[in-house]
Amino acid sequence: MIFNFIGFYSLLFSLIFSLVILYYSYIEVKNHQSQLNPKTFIFSFLHLLFVVISFLSLVISFINSDFSNETVFNNSHTTKPLFYKISGTWGNHEGSLLLWLLVLSLFIYFFLIYSKKEPKKYRVQTLVFQHFIIIGFTLFIILTSNPFTYLFPIPNEGLGLNPILQDPALAIHPPILYLGYVGCSIIFSSSLSALVNNYVNKNWAIHIKRWALISWIFLTIGILLGSIWAYYELGWGGFWFWDPVENVSLMPWICLTALIHSLLILEKKNLFTSWILILSFSTFLLSVSGTFLVRSGILNSVHTFANDPERGLFILCFLFILTIFCLVIFLKYKNQNSINNTLAFLSKETSVLINNWFMMYFLAVVFIGTTYPIFLEVISNEKISVGPPFYIKLIVPFFLPFLVLMALGPNTFFLKTNLKKYNLKLLIYFILSVIISILLANLMTTKDLFLTLILVGSIFLFISSFRDFFVKKDKYYSQRISHFAFSLLILSIILNIAFSTEVITNLKVGEKFKFNDNLIDFQSISVTQEKNYKSLNAKFKIQDNNEIVYLEPSLRIYNQPKTITSEADIKTNIYSDKFLVFNLINDEEIYNIKYQNKPFMIWIWISAVLLSLGGFVNFLEKRKI
């Protein structure tokens, strides 16, 4: 009970300190001292301290099962393991927004600490813009989503956490994803400040790129964890399903990737200043719009927080204000930051720009596919869902030139100076890619022309990226790692789609099912009692292509809330995953069985980890202008 009081008033004090910081920032802008007033650091620290106290108060309330707190009552239970009590803090609307606020506050505090070499006005105005965002989210939490609402009389037991959220990967997924999402706020605030202070130049690019990389790394890892969780927990049996909430996280990632590539050019030459500002604004605005879509309850997804429209309206208004504000600032100050430079046809700058155009097209497709059903329902009250065929038809035809451009882009300078010699090697790599693709196409379980063409592009990029490790003499490995990881990711995805097999059937215990000279043998089922659920454990013998594996999926029956979940069993090796999930039908006598053979799944996860590693290596590299 006491932590409700501490948490709520700490939140109020943090709001007061945000207002105080705005006041002192105004004074700082007016004076002409070269260094920031120490009070700015003190008040920034106190603001962060009170946000941390507020968040820890909620964590302790969950650990203690304090059901006088309505958020704890709605999302916890005394039988839950400690790990899931803690993760329950952000496994709900109110707690996750408090986590948002914590990350916002952490980023601006560390920005102040690690930007001492930057101009004072630029730092102060970044602080101002960031605290406007912080105040907006603090008011949102206090007015519509208070995580410290008091319940009386105090219930003896809570309602429990959604069972599908009680998973290690998903427990750490939101904090990591939020570090990526919310980290984009510092890019937004910094870009506004740089624009106002005519500081969009090489020095600013080097400085802000490190913050963009931090956000990008965490966003990549967060998306990876969510994808892995959906793969084995939801029983979908795949790595991506174009679910609206998946798309919501993908959109800022695409925008942030384009931004990082553009910043690399600004480090070398004063190019793309206006474009970089637009990308900086768009990345965070896409993160906020994603928050609106998830928190408003208008999306139909397994991992949205369906809440009342009042909350969605608040975020929508806040998003509208942010958009109009940065648009006005951009139109007012863009001319003083614009620099006219011509682009050579065969240059890295041109290849990065075209690469950005492709990514913006992919972003537009994902954005339209995610939001179109919403607008259609509002206008005509007609409900539709946009699935994988929509994205495949619009994205796949443009993916081949995109992959080819990625293979050529890093070598454009070399291509320009050694055109004839390099063209021959390039032609050999491409012919080799075509031959390998034709051989693989004859073995595919899925016959598709576009799939074969993408396979050509992915193999071509893979060969080119792998070659770069041995022929390039510069000491910067981040680009090579990232491009190789991306080529491995696309190649693994294409091979996974092309060679996957699936069998769906209904069986009783003791029955067998034959398919393509292979066998599924449902051998037995047993029951075990765990702390907060009962588990039905099945045992299957699978004979697949002369390989015998034993898979033991389960059904979990949770006591609070009363829910049944399917837990897949997956046997993984370097070649493929054997994936099996079963569900109960027909009064516990017949079970629906789904068995999949998923080639190269482990390489999809490995390539995503390598992609993050490339970003981390880039973060550590020190480039000279």
Image: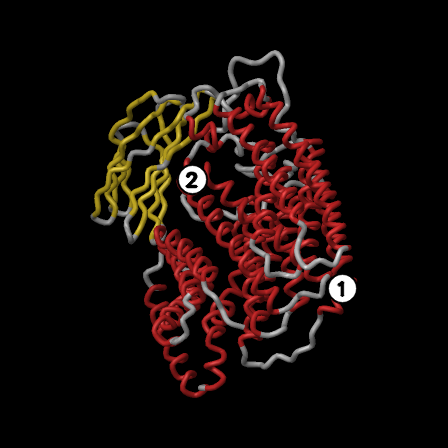
Q: Position of residue 158 (x, y in %)?
A: 52, 19
Tell me: 462 left or right of 342. Answer: left
- Say which amino acid is labelled 2: Ala
Given residues 137 and 312, the one toward you in this image is 137
Tell me: 440 left or right of 96. Answer: left
Is residue 200 positioned above or below 31 on the image? below
Residue furthest bottom in the image:
420
Residue 99: quadrant of the picture: top right
Q: Position of residue 82 (x, y in %)?
A: 42, 27
Is residue 591 positioned above or below 231 on the image? above
The nearer-to-camera label among 2 and 1 is 1
Q: Which mark is residue 158?
A: none
Is residue 275 positioned above or below 311 on the image? below
Q: Residue at x 50, y 24 (%)?
A: 76
Label 2 to label 1, Cα distance in Å?
A: 44 Å
Residue 552: quadrant of the picture: top left
Q: Which residue is mark 2?
A: 169
Q: Which residue is mark 1?
A: 333
